[in-house]
Image: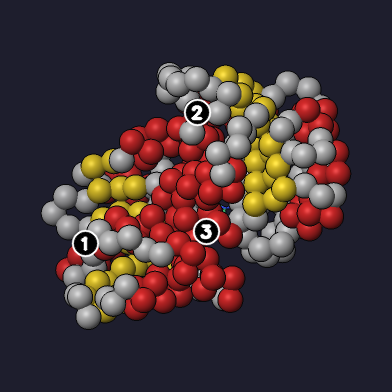
């Protein structure tokens, strides 16, 4: 083994998360003694993140992935923020130690997955549906990819406007705007649609829009990955559209986290193959 690394996942109700087995399998494949431990804080009153992080450091943990509901709160307990974290305002990875550093690999993982999917094809006019926490990460990733136009819709119109205001001074070539008008019309006019709402999960059945209304030849990127084939993904495939499911973002965030933690290059194809068997 090249060395021993301990990594944690901090969140509420994280028992079913697939991130731990992804890290452990790839850690083994990289020849590391790599352990990944769940720190489930569900049901605890007055969670003291400072204490949680200090305790992990005292036990020799190198890093912690952070998930719901601590992705924003954790920023108060780190020393350095990556560019993505500063822009998005949340982190899903903290490198522990004397100088704690926060990263947002939801953003970078989505971006690399989408780039792989598009294979250099122009993204065209993009509609993003959903402007919550994950929507900030996907929108910032696409701004970094230099897309021509991104229109953001959220059923809470104020959320879409806040996202656009937040990124107003990012610069770059993208025209970023909050949606105006009927969602079905926006869907029909888009060359690509990014779906970033919880619709399609077991607790949120259904779809946010009808993918049959998308233009022929348009592409769809889904971020929900439980189930991997959401109703949206199934119907979009049925309509003959090019579809990226939520698996590539899930693998991308794990691979990018592991790259920061190990300074090695995780094998994304191997991680995706493993993820698809989980
Ligand atoms: P969130 O609650 O912060 O935001 C969801 C947003 O969607 C809200 O602004 C809400 O108003 C909007 N919304 C809900 N239903 C809608 C509808 N029918 N039409 C339009 N807008 C609607 O949640 P989040 O943190 O942004 O996460 C969204 C989903 O992203 C999660 O449920 C999860 O499945 C997925 N996710 C996937 C990955 C991955 O690695 N693949 C990572 C993070 C999140």
Along the polypeptide, which appears first: circle 3 or circle 1? Answer: 1
Q: Looking at the image, do the residues carrying marks 3 and 1 touch, with CB atoms under 8 Å apart?
A: no
**What scheme was used to colour the molecule?**
secondary structure
Q: Is residue 39 left or right of residue 81?
A: right
Q: Is mark 2 within 8 Å of ligand 1?
A: no
**Residue 118 numbered tag:** none
The one nearer the camera, 207 or 150, is 150
Please give the name of the residue rendered at 22% of the width and 80% of the height, measured from the top-left corner: 1
- Marks 2 and 3, how far apart in space? 22 Å
Along the polypeptide, which appears first: circle 1 or circle 2? Answer: 1
The one nearer the camera, 119 or 138, is 119
Please give the name of the residue rendered at 82% of the width and 28% of the height, measured from the top-left corner: 185
Along the polypeptide, which appears first: circle 2 or circle 3? Answer: 2
Q: Is mark 3 within 8 Å of ligand 1?
A: yes
Secondary structure state at the residue bearing disc 2? loop
Above or below — where is 96 with respect to 32? above
Q: Is residue 114 left or right of residue 181?
A: left
Please give the name of the residue rendered at 13% of the width and 54% of the height, measured from the top-left corner: 98
Secondary structure state at the residue bearing disc 1? helix
Residue 268, percent from left and from top = 45, 62
**Residue 54 numbered tag:** 1
Above or below — where is 59 with respect to 233? below
Residue at numbered disc 3: 250
Above or below — where is 277 with respect to 243? below
Q: Dot 2 surroundings within 10 Å: few (below 14), some, or many (20 or more)?
A: some
**Residue 146 numbered tag:** 2
Q: Quadrant of residue 123?
A: top right
Q: Dot 1 surroundings within 10 Å: few (below 14), some, or many (20 or more)?
A: some
Residue 30, percent from left and from top = 32, 73
Mark nearer the viewer, 2 or 3: 2
Q: Dot 3 surroundings within 10 Å: few (below 14), some, or many (20 or more)?
A: many
Residue 74, percent from left and from top = 34, 49
């Amino acid at each position: 083994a090249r060395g021993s690394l301990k990594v944690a996942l901090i969140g509420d109700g994280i028992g079913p998360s697939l991130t731990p087995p992804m890290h452990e399998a790839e850690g083994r494949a990289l020849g590391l003694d790599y352990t990944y431990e769940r720190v489930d804080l569900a049901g605890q009153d007055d969670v003291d993140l400072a204490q949680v992080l200090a305790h992990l450091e005292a036990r020799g943990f190198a890093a912690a992935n952070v998930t719901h509901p601590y992705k924003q709160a954790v920023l108060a307990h780190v020393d350095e923020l990556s560019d993505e974290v500063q822009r998005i305002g949340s982190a899903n990875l903290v490198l522990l130690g004397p100088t704690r550093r926060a990263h947002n690999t939801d953003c970078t993982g989505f971006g690399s997955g989408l780039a792989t999917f598009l294979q250099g094809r122009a993204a065209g006019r993009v509609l993003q549906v959903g402007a919550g926490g994950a929507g900030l990460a996907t929108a910032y990733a696409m701004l970094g990819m230099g897309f021509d136009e991104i229109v953001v819709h959220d059923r809470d119109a104020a959320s879409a406007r806040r996202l656009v205001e937040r990124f107003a001074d990012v610069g770059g070539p993208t025209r970023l705007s909050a949606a105006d008008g009927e969602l079905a019309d926006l869907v029909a006019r888009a060359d690509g649609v990014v779906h970033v709402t919880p619709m399609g999960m077991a607790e949120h059945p259904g779809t946010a829009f009808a993918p049959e209304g998308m233009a022929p030849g348009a592409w769809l990127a889904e971020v929900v990955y439980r189930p991997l084939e959401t109703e949206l993904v199934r119907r979009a495939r049925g309509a003959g559209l090019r579809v990226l499911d939520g698996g590539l973002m899930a693998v991308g965030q794990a691979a990018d986290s592991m790259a920061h933690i190990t300074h090695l290059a995780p094998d994304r194809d191997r991680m995706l193959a493993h993820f698809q068997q989980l």
